[in-house]
Image: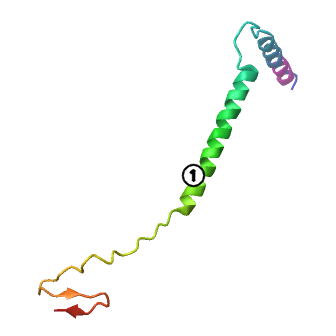
Amino acid sequence: MPDMTASASLAMTHLATLAKEVDEDKVTPGVLGFIVFAVMALAVWALMKSMNRHMSRVEFTEDPDPKAEAPADATGMTTGADGRKQG
């Protein structure tokens, strides 16, 4: 078991040195990046809310067209709305 703690200690030592090697001159997103991201997130949330409201107003059932004629069958007779043949 002492070998396990030694390797864990060695790994932590390497991770600690990697954390210290962060260059202070590198560009980071900072506060401006957070503000831009937050504004974009709010815009997406508002668009999704608006889309949900508009989609709930859509009626998906299709009403039959009263002007459309019933198709004629092979005998030349048409069927009415009640399903009976008319001549």
Query: In x, y percent, where is residue 73?
Result: 16, 83
Whether the magenta-drawn stretch holds residue 8 is answered as yes
Instruction: Indicate left or right for 35 with 16 as reference.
Output: left
- Which residue was labeled with disc 1? 51
| Residue interval drawn in magenta | 4-9
Instruction: Indicate left or right for 15 with 76 as reference.
Output: right
Query: In x, y percent, where is residue 35?
Result: 72, 28
Instruction: Indicate left or right for 59 with 6 as reference.
Output: left
Which residue appears at 69% of the width and 12% of the height?
Answer: 27
As drawn, 65 above or below 48: below
- Furthest toward the front, the residue is 67
Position of the N terminus, as image quadrant, is top right
- Which is more toward the observer, 85 or 15? 85
Q: Could you tell me which secondary element the residue under label 1 belongs to?
A: helix
Query: In x, y percent, where is residue 12?
Result: 82, 19
As drawn, 54 above or below 8: below
Which residue appears at 70% of the width and 33% of the height?
Answer: 38
Image quadrant assignment for residue 86: bottom left
As drawn, 32 above or below 38: above
- Furthest toward the left, the residue is 75
Instruction: Provide the major secondary structure of the magenta segment.
Output: helix
Figure disc tally: 1
Whether the magenta-drawn stretch holds residue 6 is answered as yes
Which residue appears at 17% of the width and 81% of the height?
Answer: 72
Which residue appears at 32% of the width and 78% of the height?
Answer: 66
Neighbour tally class for label 1: few under 14, some 14-19, many 20 plus, Cα within 10 Å: few
Residue flagged by tag 1: what amino acid is it? Met
- Which is more toward the observer, 4 or 55? 55
Position of the C terminus, as image quadrant, is bottom left
